């Protein structure tokens, strides 16, 4: 299998996909260390812009902390928008043991967006990126399940992970694992990651992590899989594609005509659709939801092409 992006973290992609993917967790230590497109230096740069804000930044200390504790309000053109990340407050909360969660790095960090686009093409899945910073001796999020396969790349410090069994069937939910969910799933792996180490957590496998030494930072690559809801949405999109019907037919005859056309269109679109086709289409819709490739043109180039005076025509 030709998957050079995936190989940066798991070594042999074919072995990873046949031995670990969807089956069991694993730890990988690729030559030179697992690559991370985002580091603590990039985090400093993001915070220093002054534009970084909630919901891209969260803080947790057992539970999610109120945004007012780590964000500030600004005055901008007579309005007072809130939610701007306050670097000083964030560092003070880290000193007190809270965990910083930076969401959707791929939406606003170009190198990460480019990296995830390559990984999504190789795996045929939607991929997102999250960055966690946790002090030593402190737990980040509580025991929980993710609705995604996760590749964890340790960037700084070290962190100890506890991986528990996956769900028994498809009737599970993502999020915190509580006593209401039944007996606590058995732990099947404990490992401490150090910079360059990579951990794979299969979709739905419960897990939690605790900072070990230093200030732990890791990049989580979440590889999304579709569920029943996404399959149903894809069917609905196929039914509605290329069908032009009046929104509110008037009268019984018009309503029956619309129903007839809708049924005929549905049969035509779905008759040749196989389960594999439907799954491929649903996954493709997920990939299409990823941030687009950035426009490579710049305002400097635009200015160089712009006419010197209004009457010289539009730029080429």
Image (cartoon, rainbow, N blue to C red):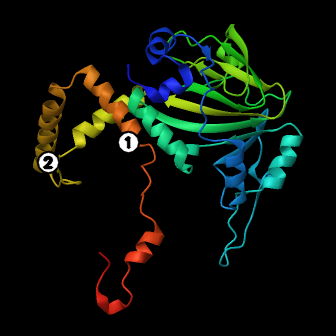
Q: Earlier in the sequence, mark 2 or mark 1?
A: 2
Q: Is residue 234 above or below residue 20?
A: below
**Mark 2 Cα shell of 10 Å, populated few (<14), some (14-19), many (≥20):** few
Residue drawn at x 49%, y 34% is 127
Nearest the eye: 306 or 244: 306
Q: Quadrant of residue 123?
A: top left
Local secondary structure at mark 1 = helix
Measured as percent of width and height from the top left, residue 177 is found at 67, 21
Name the residue: 70% across, 70% down: 80
- x and y percentages locating residue 12 in the rendered image: 48, 16
User: Percent from the top left, x then y, of residue 252?
Assistant: 14, 48
User: Horizontal and vertical percent for residue 230?
Assistant: 39, 32
Check the picture and name the quadrant holding the N terminus: top left
Please indicate, yes or no, whether residue 298 appears anywhere in the rendered image.
yes
Q: Which mark is residue 149?
A: none
Q: Residue most toward the front?
A: 32
Q: Is residue 31 left or right of residue 161?
A: left
Q: Toward which corner of the image does residue 203 lie, by quadrant?
A: top right
Disc 1 packing (10 Å; few <14; some 14–19; many ≥20): few
Q: Which residue is mark 2?
A: 252
- In which quadrant of the rendered image does the C terminus lie? bottom left
Left or right of 76? Residue 304 is: left
Residue plotted at (40% across, 36% down): 286
* Residue behind mark 1: 288
Q: Say which quarter of the image contains residue 10.
A: top right
Q: Identify which residue is drawn at 83% across, 47% down.
A: 91
As measured in the structure, the alpha-carbon distance from the residue carrying label 2 to the one carrying label 1 is: 39 Å
């Amino acid at each position: 299998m030709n998957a050079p992006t995936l190989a940066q973290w798991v070594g042999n992609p074919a072995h990873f996909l046949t031995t670990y993917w969807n089956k069991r967790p694993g730890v990988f230590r690729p030559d030179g260390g697992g690559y991370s497109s985002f580091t603590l230096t990039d985090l400093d740069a993001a915070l220093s812009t002054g534009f970084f804000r909630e919901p891209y930044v969260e803080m947790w200390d057992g539970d999610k902390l109120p945004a007012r504790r780590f964000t500030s309000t600004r005055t901008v053109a007579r309005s007072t928008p809130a939610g701007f990340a306050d670097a000083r407050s964030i560092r003070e909360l880290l000193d007190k043991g809270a965990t910083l969660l930076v969401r959707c790095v791929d939406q606003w960090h170009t190198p990460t967006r480019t990296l995830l686009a390559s990984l999504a093409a190789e795996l045929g899945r939607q991929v997102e990126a999250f960055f966690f910073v946790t002090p030593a001796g402190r737990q980040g999020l509580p025991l929980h399940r993710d609705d995604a396969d996760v590749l964890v790349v340790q960037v700084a410090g070290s962190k100890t992970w506890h991986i528990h069994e996956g769900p028994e069937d498809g009737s599970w939910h993502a999020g915190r694992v509580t006593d209401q969910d039944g007996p606590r799933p058995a732990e099947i792996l404990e490992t401490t990651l150090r910079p360059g180490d990579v951990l794979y957590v299969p979709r739905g496998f419960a897990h939690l992590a605790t900072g070990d030494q230093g200030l732990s930072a890791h990049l989580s690559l979440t590889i999304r899989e579709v569920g029943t809801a996404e399959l149903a949405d894809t069917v609905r999109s196929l039914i509605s594609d290329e069908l032009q019907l009046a929104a509110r037919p008037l009268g019984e005859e018009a309503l029956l005509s619309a129903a007839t056309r809708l049924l005929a269109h549905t049969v035509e679109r779905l008759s040749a659709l196989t389960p594999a086709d439907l799954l491929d289409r649903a996954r493709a819709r997920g990939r299409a939801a990823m941030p687009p490739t950035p426009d490579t043109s710049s305002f400097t180039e635009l200015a160089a092409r712009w006419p010197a005076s209004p009457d010289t025509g539009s730029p080429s």
